[in-house]
Image (cartoon, rainbow, N blue to C red):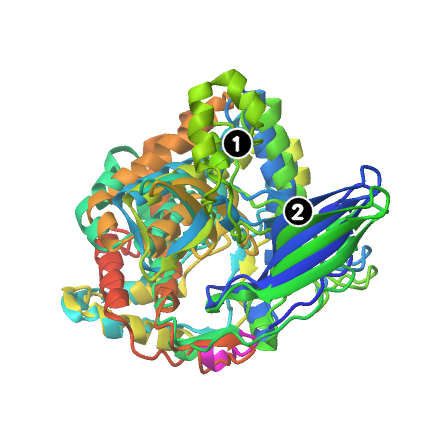
Amino acid sequence: MNVEKIENLEEVLRLDQNQTVADCKITRLTGPGENYGSLIMRLEVKVADDKTKSEKDLDLVAKLLPPNELIRKLFNVQTTFRNESSLYSEIVPVLEEFQKQHGLEVVDIFPKYYGSRISLDPDSDKVDDGAVLILENLNPKGYTTGDRRVGFDLDTARFILKNLAYFHAIPLALKLKNPALFEEKVKPHLTDFAFGDDLDTNGFLRDLYNVLEIDERCRPYFKKIEKLFRQTSLKVVHEPFATVLHNDFWVNNMLLKFENGRPVGIKMVDFQVIEYKCPCRDLLFFLFSSVQLEVLEDHLDELIDLEVFEKQLELAAKEAEYFHIVGMLFPIHANPEDVKELNEISFEDIENNKELSAECNMNVEKIENLEEVLRLDQNQTVADCKITRLTAPGENYGSLIMRLEVKVADDKTKSEKDLDLVAKLLPPNELIRKLFKVQTTFRNESSLYSEIVPVLEEFQKQHGLEVVDIFPKYYGSRISLDPYSDKVDDGAVLILENLNPKGTISKIEAQYREMGHVRKVPSKRQAVVDDDTKLNLLLALEENPITPARYTTGDRRVGFDLDTARFILKNLAYFHAIPLALKLKNPALFEKKVKPHLTDYAFAGDLDANGFLRDLYNVLEIDERCRPYFKKIEKLFRQASLKVVHEPFATVLHNDFWVNNMLLKFENGRPVGIKMVDFQVIEYKCPCRDLLFFLFSSVQLEVLEDHLDELIDLYYESFIEKLQEFECDTAPFSREVFEKQLELAAKEAEYFHIVGMLFPIHANPKDVKELNEISFEDFENNKEISAECKAKLLFVTLEFIRRGWLDNEVDK
């Protein structure tokens, strides 16, 4: 899928009147299977300023609606696109300002937001093909996405959990300290998301049982699993823990930066299904979907301290997260070779859960009216725009993601500047558009960047806090080329900074970056004055340019290590906590600016639930400990309640926070930065859903085995710490209540969210299809389930059983 141009790019980027897009090179950023909810493009934009006669380059990421109608329907893009856009544009600014008002350093877990739109028609209230969300490209800054099929190690899982706790705690703090602002600015953007109301639940359970069947410990639980599945309650909101819930916090939905092999930064992405729910759901989903199996086996209790908030964990597990997790394990461990392109996806692809495949072959040659989207100044124009595919098949089914290398010419200054951007377009496949409900999801994501993020950032600044830098820079978006359209159509585009641009820097600049002089490299004369010895060192290095650390996406099949998981969780906690703090401190602002963009997401497909359970049971059958829970699993699956909002924890929920929906930057092997992306299904839910989904979908198994409780502790501590920075009353968010929220998140949504996602996460890359090739057969016909996927499914299920999260009784 090629995107040649994003129409009205200047408008989306909110450029000054004297600025124009002189050039924009657009390339595909994610491959098939990495992000099905959006089409993600890199935009290398050159902005020209007629007034100063200068140019500047912007490296952005644009999230567009997935080109496949099935995916748009399944992902409910009308809600999810608005959700994510609102998170960046409304919620994040409020949360950041809230932190600043409290004299706190802003938790840097969101990519910089440049702009968004739901349509080219300014009067439209529908997300259409003109929808676009533009964020900074985190890859050039050293942020990368983990391998979904590997998962995170212990250190990375710890790091992620700490940030996840902050993500949850900050909006919760806002809710406590300024409830009027939270109600006005954050909560309206946290809408319940339901994925695929017609999916084949029996097929899902069948696939799950096929895996669990190998363990005799699982077999007695088949009925319990089915019972939990049938009664899963995703919509329950458990207060006081309810906060911004990512709702899809796994390997692909965060980017990590490493230095010396350790995570030092995290950016959370993909806030399309954010909800107002308990953060335990994010916690459980993250742990069991994204942490390495061996980590979970050895450190799960360390990552989750169950002494105080065990009940919340149990509720999260029983109400949602078991099925969220096990459901996600299939796609997480999908074979990359089998992942399809967005516009190739059909209902058969979804229900048959093939290991989707195919090299990227979707070309986007032009994005119409790119200047308007980028919001360039009147004297600025896009002189050139090179568009290339950014993601491979299977990496992102909800959008077509392109890289835009934009050259912006400024007629006034007679100068040019380059912008490296990412454009998210609608998936080309009608099935995908339908499944992912692009009318909602594209609006969600655009709204997050354009509405929510600015509010959260301003909120942090008002409290004297450093703004948490977890969002890509937003350049602009639209839902349609028709300014009067209220429908998200093929003109929809979301443009963000490209976090992983090409190029090198001088070693002088690298040296100064190490010294903390990040913004500008001093001249040689300045260096002499400061330190002759330093100068000699720098001059000796000057002739040998090096490649700087960039934001990159992890390997979904590997997952994050412990350090990276810790880094991500800390930022996820900030992501959740800041809008929650806004809700507490200024509920009116939250209700006005954030909550309206958090709409419930319901996957719009007709998937075979029985087939899903069958596949799950086929895996779980091998462990006898699982078998007695099959009926409970099915019962939970049938009663899953994605729309339940648990107060007071409800906050902005990413709702799809896994490996592919975040980019990380590493320095010396450690994560130093994270940008969260893909906010298409953002909702107003408990943040525990993001926490659980991230942990179990995106952290390496060995990390989860050894450090799960530790990672949960880290998240919770970071979450509370961030709320305290806003001077929020944290008494309603006790560990005991948090544990209850975790349980609710697990039971209501995250078990099936996780296990359902593990299949595609661990899919074989050779089986991944292009977006425009996907059909329902691809979803239903799971090809060979990898050993990694089976191991993760078993671990998640047994861990949920051990914690009592698969018991049918959901005590709220």
Quarter of the rendering occupied by the C terminus:
top left
Identify the residue at image location x=71%, y=54%.
Answer: 407
Q: Quick one: 459 or 567, which is closer to the camera?
A: 567
- The three-letter code of the residue at mark 2 reads Asp
In the displayed structure, 502 sits above or below 649; it is below
Residue 525 x %, y %: 57, 23
Residue 529 x %, y %: 53, 16
CA neighbours of label 1 inside 10 A, class few (<14), some (14 to 19), many (20+): few
Q: Quick one: 606 or 471, which is closer to the camera?
A: 471
Residue 528 seen from this side: yes
User: Is 349 part of what is drawn in magenta?
Assistant: yes
- Residue annotated with mark 1: 518
Tag 1 near tag 2, CB within 8 Å: no
Tell me the element at label 2: strand
User: Is 639 part of what is drawn in magenta?
Assistant: no
- The tag earlier along the polypeptide, 1 or 2, is 2
In the displayed structure, 681 sits above or below 466; it is below
Residue 85 x %, y %: 63, 50
Q: What distance separates the C-alpha of mark 1 from that of mark 2?
A: 17 Å
- Residue annotated with mark 2: 57
**Residues rendered magenta in the picture:** 342-350
Q: Quick one: 793 or 809, which is closer to the camera?
A: 793
Quarter of the rendering occupied by the N terminus:
bottom right
Identify the residue at image location x=46%, y=38%.
Answer: 507
In the displayed structure, 622 sits above or below 249; it is below
CA neighbours of label 2 inside 10 A, class few (<14), some (14 to 19), many (20+): many
Residue 446 seen from this side: no
Q: Quadrant of residue 119?
A: bottom right
Tell me the element at label 1: loop
- The three-letter code of the residue at mark 1 reads Val
Is 649 displayed left or right of 498 in the figure? left
